[in-house]
Image: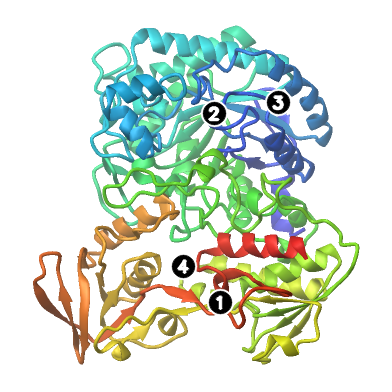
């Protein structure tokens, strides 16, 4: 272990509870010990996930949020004592690891609930709402401090909670906390004056227009959160730790309007001046630790930072707020061990909050301890499986039902929260498996096959492993993607997998193998557009093709917008042309990712032409057609086209031939890696 990391392995205290090191696994939706988006119960999958991370040297584990009242069915969490008996037995096993666990309890989502089209219909139609109430009581699930617009759906308003409902919830928090304490849980965390969830909607000015004792002054706006901690302390004793998930600064300009890094704006939520007062008030009320970051669902990329956000993006604000409290302070948000260690050593921070790295690699802390950093599979902040809630145009959340019900899966590690679906089972008969293509899909398949006892052999026509992901990782803001490529190459070498570079295969039938996996990727779409040959294809640009100062990008999907952002960072002047009604109109692209790109490009004043199609590419410009059918021209130095891809398998699947990755179906890293596992598990 590096000497600079030693401070991360020193003990600290939350109240009277000692935590063995400075690593905190922060809560992630889907990892609740009481289940997710279903009637509450003791969740065996989450329990196994949490125990595994505790065994791998995490000091404090925070399971995913547990709604104080079920999202499905409306049962109170304190009802049904059977799950607490199971929890008590589990905690006895959990504590053998030396880790501590605080269960995170939430008042709910309010206007931030990621409603889908069915939920929207239930909210807009009283009859449908009444019929669906026994399963999803949308009136209650979306209730908030005041009548405010839903983050995800136009024309859907939250109604204000009544005082009686607030008081009932406060009592429910206390009852549930006592049951957790009696089950051996080390503490509870209240979720949250944070990220624009229900308690935060009470706490912030722009979402709270109440005129009773829960609105108006800061003291009134914090009353709900303060009443909760006081009730828990009264029920459980003053020495039972209660922590708070807390957003230091909201970073919010208005409803559905975040503030990107570097932007000057007027804060409508909690600014730093108010936060300095609020943090002290919350401490004095009884909270024993602040688990911090920034943002709201209107500025979601602060609380769930995508690849484009800088590392340690929330650290300056969190270090500042620590000056105003005497209780421990934790910071989360793309934290690096180097920055966390330096901050803790200087007394500016107490612990390092990490979430999604635990999804990718459960052993990452152990590897850090043992000085094996090159063995750590890095999180790339893609949100392709852990958070696929998407919004574009006039749509509500268009997330697949599977993803909504089963969150905190991982694009890079299919085994996360899916132990029984993705398994490494040793083969009874070792086979030689030829893998044509050394991209991510090919390498992932090779690793799974090797771990199962097979003999994989990779044939790659270029001189390096990585495939098209090398180009995808070439952006200046994708350092974690570059680290992922290095991890794959290191893992292939560590496992002793046979690799033949600069070897192009033209006939899979000639390969000396029992089975063949074709992972030859995809090729760009080339529609019949006049002058298309004059354009630069997206992958050409990513391979280093130089372009002029004024660039028109055809295609405002994820790749097109990322290229535009890269050009902005280079000081160039891009213009985006997109045929649909929004940028990044792609299902499964997390709103944290897409909203950052939309809002950053707007901040950088990048011209965007929506509902616009390309007619012709000419020397020095393009001819476009708007939604009315009117033709117009834009002049430019170069045109970059990002018009999608289609599979290019070397051979069709069938018999001993299997397809993985984009050679089978064009997708993202999740589809590539998960399909590689499915194929490799069957061989």
* Colour treatment of the image: rainbow
The CA span between labels 4 and 1 is 24 Å
- Which residue has dot 1 on it? 521
Mark with earlier residue (3, 4): 3
Q: Nearer the viewer, residue 131 or 309?
A: 131
Mark with earlier residue (2, 4): 2
Percent position of residue 535, x then y: 31, 86
Which label belongs to residue 532?
none
Q: Is residue 531 above or below residue 117?
A: below
User: Quick one: label 1, few (<14), some, or many (20+) residues within 10 Å?
Assistant: many
Residue at 74 percent of width and 90 percent of height: 510
Mark with earlier residue (4, 1): 4
Q: Nearer the viewer, residue 674 or 318?
A: 674
Residue at 28 percent of width and 19 percent of height: 217
User: Quick one: label 2, few (<14), some, or many (20+) residues within 10 Å?
Assistant: few
Q: Nearer the viewer, mark 2 or mark 4?
A: 4
The CA span between labels 1 and 2 is 55 Å
Q: Nearer the viewer, mark 1 or mark 3?
A: 1
**Image marks 2 and 3: residues in contact by CB distance under 8 Å:** no
Q: Is residue 400 above or below residue 479?
A: above
Percent position of residue 519, x then y: 62, 76
- Which residue has dot 4 on it? 477
- Which residue has dot 2 on it? 326
Q: Is 320 placed left or right of 435 in the picture?
A: left
- Secondary structure at badge 2 equals loop
The CA span between labels 2 and 3 is 16 Å
């Amino acid at each position: 272990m590096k000497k600079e990391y030693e401070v991360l392995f020193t003990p600290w205290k939350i109240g009277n509870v000692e935590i063995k090191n400075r690593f905190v696994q922060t809560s992630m939706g889907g990892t609740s010990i009481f289940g997710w988006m279903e009637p509450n119960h003791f969740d065996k999958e989450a329990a196994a996930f949490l125990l595994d991370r505790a065994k791998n040297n995490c000091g404090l584990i925070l399971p995913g949020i547990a709604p104080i009242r079920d999202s499905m069915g409306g049962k109170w969490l304190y009802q049904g004592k059977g799950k607490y008996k199971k929890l008590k037995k589990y905690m006895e096993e959990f504590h053998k690891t030396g880790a501590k666990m605080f269960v995170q309890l939430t008042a709910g989502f309010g206007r931030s609930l990621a409603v889908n089209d069915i939920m929207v219909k239930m909210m807009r139609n009283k009859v449908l709402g009444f019929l669906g109430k026994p399963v999803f009581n949308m009136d209650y699930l979306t209730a908030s401090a005041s009548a405010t617009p839903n983050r995800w759906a136009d024309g859907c308003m939250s109604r204000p909670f009544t005082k009686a409902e607030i008081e009932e919830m406060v009592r429910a928090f206390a009852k549930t906390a006592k049951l957790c304490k009696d089950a051996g849980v080390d503490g509870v965390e209240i979720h949250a004056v944070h990220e624009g969830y229900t308690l935060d909607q009470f706490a912030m000015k722009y979402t709270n227009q109440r005129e009773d004792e829960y609105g108006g002054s800061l003291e009134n706006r914090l009353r709900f959160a303060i009443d909760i901690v006081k009730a828990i302390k009264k029920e459980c004793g003053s020495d039972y730790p209660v922590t708070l998930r807390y957003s230091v600064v909201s970073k919010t300009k208005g409803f559905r309007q975040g503030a990107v890094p570097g932007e000057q704006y007027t804060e409508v939520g909690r600014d730093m001046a108010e936060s300095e007062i609020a943090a002290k008030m919350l401490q004095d009320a009884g909270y024993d630790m602040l688990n911090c970051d920034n943002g709201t669902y209107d500025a979601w990329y602060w609380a769930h930072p995508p690849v484009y956000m800088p590392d340690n993006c929330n650290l300056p604000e969190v270090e500042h707020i620590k000056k105003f409290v005497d209780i421990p302070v934790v910071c989360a948000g793309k934290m690096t061990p180097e920055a966390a260690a330096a901050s803790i050593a200087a007394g500016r921070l107490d612990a390092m909050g990490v979430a999604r790295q635990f999804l990718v690699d459960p052993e990452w802390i152990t590897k850090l301890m043992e000085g094996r950093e090159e063995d750590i599979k890095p999180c790339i902040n893609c949100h392709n499986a852990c958070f696929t809630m998407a919004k574009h145009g006039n749509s509500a959340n268009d997330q697949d039902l599977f993803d909504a019900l089963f969150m905190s899966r991982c694009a890079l590690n299919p085994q996360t929260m899916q132990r029984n679906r993705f398994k490494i089972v040793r083969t009874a008969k070792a086979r030689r498996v030829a893998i044509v293509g050394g991209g991510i899909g090919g390498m992932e398949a090779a690793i799974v096959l090797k771990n199962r006892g097979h003999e994989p052999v990779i044939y790659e026509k270029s001189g390096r492993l990585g495939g098209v992901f090398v180009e995808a990782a070439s952006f200046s803001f994708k350092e974690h993607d570059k680290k992922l490529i290095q991890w794959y190459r290191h893992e292939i070498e560590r496992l002793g997998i046979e690799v033949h570079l600069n070897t192009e295969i033209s006939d899979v039938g000639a390969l000396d193998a029992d089975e063949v996996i074709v992972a030859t990727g995809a090729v760009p779409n080339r529609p019949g557009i006049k002058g298309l040959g004059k354009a630069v294809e997206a992958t050409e640009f990513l391979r280093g093709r130089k372009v002029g100062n004024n660039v028109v990008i055809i295609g405002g999907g994820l790749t097109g917008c990322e290229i535009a952002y890269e050009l902005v960072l280079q000081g160039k002047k891009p213009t985006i042309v997109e045929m649909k009604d929004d940028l990044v109109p792609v299902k499964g692209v997390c709103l944290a990712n897409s909203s950052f790109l939309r809002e950053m490009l707007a901040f950088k004043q990048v011209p965007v032409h929506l509902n616009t199609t390309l007619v012709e590419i000419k020397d020095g410009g393009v001819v476009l057609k708007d939604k009315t059918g009117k033709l117009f021209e834009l002049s430019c130095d170069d045109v970059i086209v990002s018009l999608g891809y289609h599979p290019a398998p070397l051979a069709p699947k069938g018999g001993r031939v299997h397809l993985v990755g984009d050679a089978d179906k064009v997708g993202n890293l999740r589809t590539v890696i998960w399909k590689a596992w499915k194929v490799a598990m069957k061989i």
